[in-house]
Image (cartoon, rainbow, N blue to C red):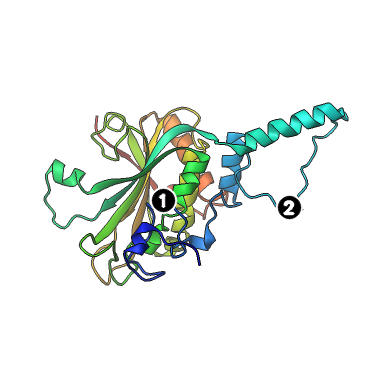
Amino acid sequence: MGPLCPAHQQGGEPGSQEFLCWTCSERCSNRRRRRSLPEAAPATPASERLAAKLGARTSPVMADEPPTPPRDAEEPEDGEVAEATANASAADAGPHPLEHKWTFWEQKKAEKKTMSKKEWGELQRKLFTFDTVEEFWKYFAHVPPPTNVFYDGKAAKRVGKAGEERVIESFSLFKEGIAPEWEDSANISGGEWNLRTNRSMVAGIDDWWQNLVLGLVGHTIAEKDEICGARIVDKSGNKGSNQVFRIELWLRTKDPKMIKAIRDKMIDVMTDGKPPRGFHDQFQWKMHGV
């Protein structure tokens, strides 16, 4: 049994929705972790693309997994082997910088329909900021899958300690300096691709969201700086209604050719290259402002 994070030191039952530890940077024996998510990237096609993009392996290496030598390589001298090994060890040690600096946000559900801009802004909360592979996994390992905190088809889930309980409406990942709101100067001239899930899609929503996050962090969806961020939003209705979630990818561009190429690459990353039939047609384009 490992040490408890600060939140669990204050109380709460292991595995409950009381404390989800996503802002805790320490190892916590009670934290909720999907499939025992490791501090390094899991071995999925999306994480392998992240590793390839960064030029560094971020997934665990098995002790009995020998390195594969390049084909047709000349036999190196002993000194060259030692130098190459030292350089590889230094590179693997990290930290491994990302293409951009990112911030992960949480938005709690509003308790009233009419709100001022200030009140709406107060619903948003920065959870963490990172700009290396190591920092990303240090924090993201504590973020629960969306379906663990969103409406489950029976009731909305309240999380947090007594006095700070809230219903989470969305998670967002945006480049540092860009707020997850239309009025931000980086967002207002562009738009978003969004996918509104139906009942048959709910089972895949956690994997799609995680793959999209990995695609953004690894800079594998768009080579140019056209992506602002992404959101996953709980759009479910009242108690007893169906689960409805929406995945959004926000862009600073509205160029037709470019947004279509980004949509296609996003779908490829989200689904590990195996989109359900008709999946592309489920995505809708929405303009943000001017």
Q: Is residue 223 above or below residue 151?
A: above
Q: Position of residue 243 (x, y in %)?
A: 34, 64
Residue found at x 40% / y 37%: 102
Q: Is residue 95 above or below residue 29?
A: above
Mark 1 crowdedness (10 Å alpha carbons): few <14, some 14-19, many ≥20: few
Q: Is residue 106 above or below residue 200?
A: above
Q: Position of residue 65 (x, y in %)?
A: 75, 50
How many numbered markers are drawn?
Answer: 2
Q: Are marks 1 and 2 in contact (CB under 8 Å)?
A: no
244 sits left or right of 80 in the view: left
Nearer-the-camera pick, 43 or 12: 12
Q: Which mark is residue 63?
A: 2
The part of the image, by quadrant, that contains residue 108 is bottom left
Q: Which mark is residue 282?
A: 1
Nearer-the-camera pick, 256 or 223: 223
Q: Is residue 129 visible?
A: yes
Mark 2 residue element: loop
The amino acid pointed to by label 1 is: Gln
Mark 1 residue element: helix
The part of the image, by quadrant, that contains residue 149 is bottom left
The part of the image, by quadrant, that contains residue 17 is bottom left
Residue found at x 48% / y 39%: 217
Q: Position of residue 46 (x, y in %)?
A: 56, 46
The amino acid pointed to by label 2 is: Ala
- For the C terminus, the quadrant is top left
33 sits left or right of 149 in the view: right
Q: Is residue 22 above or below residue 184?
A: below
Question: Which sits earlier in the primary sequence, circle 1 or circle 2?
Answer: 2
Residue found at x 31% / y 52%: 170
Nearer-the-camera pick, 287 or 133: 133
Mark pair 1, 2: CA separation:
43 Å
